[in-house]
Image (spheres, helix red, strand yellow):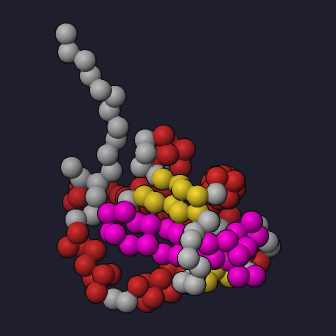
Amino acid sequence: MQTSKPSVSLSPLLPRPFSLPLKLLPVAWHSRALVAALNRIFAEDLNDGEMDFLQGRSVAIEVSDMNLSYRLTLNETRFVENINQAENDLTVRASLYDFMSMASRQVDPDTLVFQRRLVMEGDTELGLALKNYLDAMDVESSRVLSIVESVSRKTMPVYKKLFGR
């Protein structure tokens, strides 16, 4: 009798050579670009204090298949790079494809956590607050979020075809 293992959906991984251009640039450059994008995407909520739970907290975003890590914090009403703090309060790690899956709302974070494709380490309460905030976002009311969702949704099939296993 043959037993079968439960199948875990594996996300396509970006081959290392494709992450090389970002590796050649100083991390500060693309880190600043990420912070600027996040400030633009979440501008209204930042101004309204919706993300104050991140105030002064160090969050690392790690893109595992690109071997890139970004550290940021909320300083008043803006995200800023956080290069001074030795430890992170929260680390969020996933592949580029899995981040795209969440941005396109094709997969919810809970599913990725249960499949061990999204890892959150550190302050559990902070991680839960961030997850709940992201789950509750009204994408339709934000032009920028709608664009991010649409671009992610349209890019994913191509990404999967190119880099799928």
Residue 45 appears left or right of 39: right
Q: Total of numbered circles in the picture? A: 0
Residue 100 appears left or right of 44: left
Q: Quadrant of residue 155?
A: bottom left
Query: Residue 127's x, y, as percent?
Result: 63, 56
Question: Image height check: is 32 above or below 158?
Answer: below
Residue 43 appears left or right of 118: right
Query: Residue 57's x, y, as percent?
Result: 67, 71
Q: Quadrant of residue 35?
A: bottom right
Quadrant location of the N terminus in the rendered image: top left
The residue located at (70%, 69%) in the rendering is 54
Name of the residue lying farthest toward the front = 86
The residue located at (38%, 59%) in the rendering is 95
Any magenta on residue 158? no
The residue located at (57%, 69%) in the rendering is 88
15 or 153: which is nearer to us? 15
Question: Image height check: is 82 above or below 117?
Answer: below
Residue 135 appears left or right of 68: right
- Which span is picked out in magenta? 51-76
Query: Residue 160's x, y, as percent?
Result: 28, 55
Query: Residue 104's x, y, as percent?
Result: 48, 57
Residue 56: in sight, yes or no? Answer: yes
Question: Image height check: is 65 above or below 18?
Answer: above
Name of the residue lying farthest toward the right = 48
Residue 136: in sight, yes or no? Answer: no
Name of the residue lying farthest toward the top = 1
Any magenta on residue 68? yes
The residue located at (41%, 85%) in the rendering is 27
